[in-house]
């Protein structure tokens, strides 16, 4: 577990918790969904993997629609995809990212029940966001949802962190941000947030205890530091 706080004091009160979605609130990518995408395209792992990620940041930033993203993915792989293949790939991509990280979702629900504001700051394209929202009804309980494609911005762009903090109405230093990518966490530090790099559940919980946030984990109520 790597924890960062930049120039922010870990003694600053946490008034809101901001979650990344992928591999924080969701579980790891579903290998069955990935295998399905390989089957749909007929591509090898070595060819499909780089093609999947090459246009992803532009998709996250809303520069491609879901249809356009998959056309671009096909072009990177030297493949022309049919409309049916694209539709099937969008469905499989939704399945890839909708396994639930139950301990973190349960904590988000405890926070909400305890009156602690919660939000999501996630890099997701339009079709994937629609799929995630359709499959994860519990997302409706969050106070503030920031999906990158809607803003034409994506992490680690500093502006998207400013918008996320502004949505809570708190100073950035009173927001705890959790993400699984080092560059996104580093950008959270630069934005002035308290941040934790999520690696494993046990390491995350240990870091909360180290910061004196044990009660926040158990009760979901701020002001118990």
Image (spheres, grey):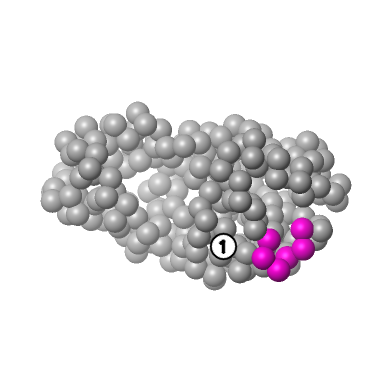
Q: Quadrant of residue 13?
A: bottom right
* Element class at badge 1: helix
State the extent of the magenta-drawn residues as a range: 5-10
User: Measuring 47% from the left and 59% from the top, which residue is drawn there?
Assistant: 148
149 relative to 25, above or below = below
**Residue 130 in picture, x, y percent from top left:** 43, 46
Residue annotated with mark 1: 186
User: Measuring 52% from the left and 39% from the top, which residue is drawn there?
Assistant: 26
**Residue 27 in picture, x, y percent from top left:** 50, 36
Residue 88 relative to residue 111: left or right: left
Residue 119 visible, this orientation: no
**Residue 128 in picture, x, y percent from top left:** 40, 47
49 relative to 137, above or below = below
56 relative to 115, above or below = below
Residue 89 visible, this orientation: yes
- Tell whether position 54 is magenta: no
């Amino acid at each position: 577990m790597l924890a960062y706080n930049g120039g922010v004091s870990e003694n600053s009160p946490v008034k809101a918790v901001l979650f990344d979605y992928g591999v924080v609130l969701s579980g790891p990518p579903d290998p069955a969904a990935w295998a399905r995408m390989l089957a749909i395209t007929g591509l090898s792992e070595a060819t499909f993997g780089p093609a999947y990620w090459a246009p992803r940041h532009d998709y996250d930033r809303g520069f491609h629609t879901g249809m356009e993203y998959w056309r671009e993915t096909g072009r990177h792989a030297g493949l022309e995809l049919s409309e049916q293949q694209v539709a099937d790939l969008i469905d499989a991509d939704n399945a890839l990212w909708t396994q639930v990280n139950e301990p973190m979702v349960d904590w988000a629900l405890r926070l909400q029940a305890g009156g602690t504001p919660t939000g999501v700051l996630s890099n997701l394209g339009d079709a994937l966001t629609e799929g995630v929202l359709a499959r994860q009804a519990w997302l409706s309980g969050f106070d503030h949802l920031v999906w990158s494609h809607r803003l034409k911005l994506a992490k680690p762009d500093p502006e998207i962190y400013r918008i996320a903090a502004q949505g809570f109405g708190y100073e950035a230093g009173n927001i705890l941000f959790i993400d699984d990518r080092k560059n996104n966490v580093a950008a959270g530090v630069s934005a002035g947030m308290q941040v934790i790099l999520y690696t494993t559940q046990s390491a995350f919980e240990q870091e909360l205890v180290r910061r004196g946030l044990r009660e926040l984990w158990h009760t979901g109520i701020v002001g118990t530091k």
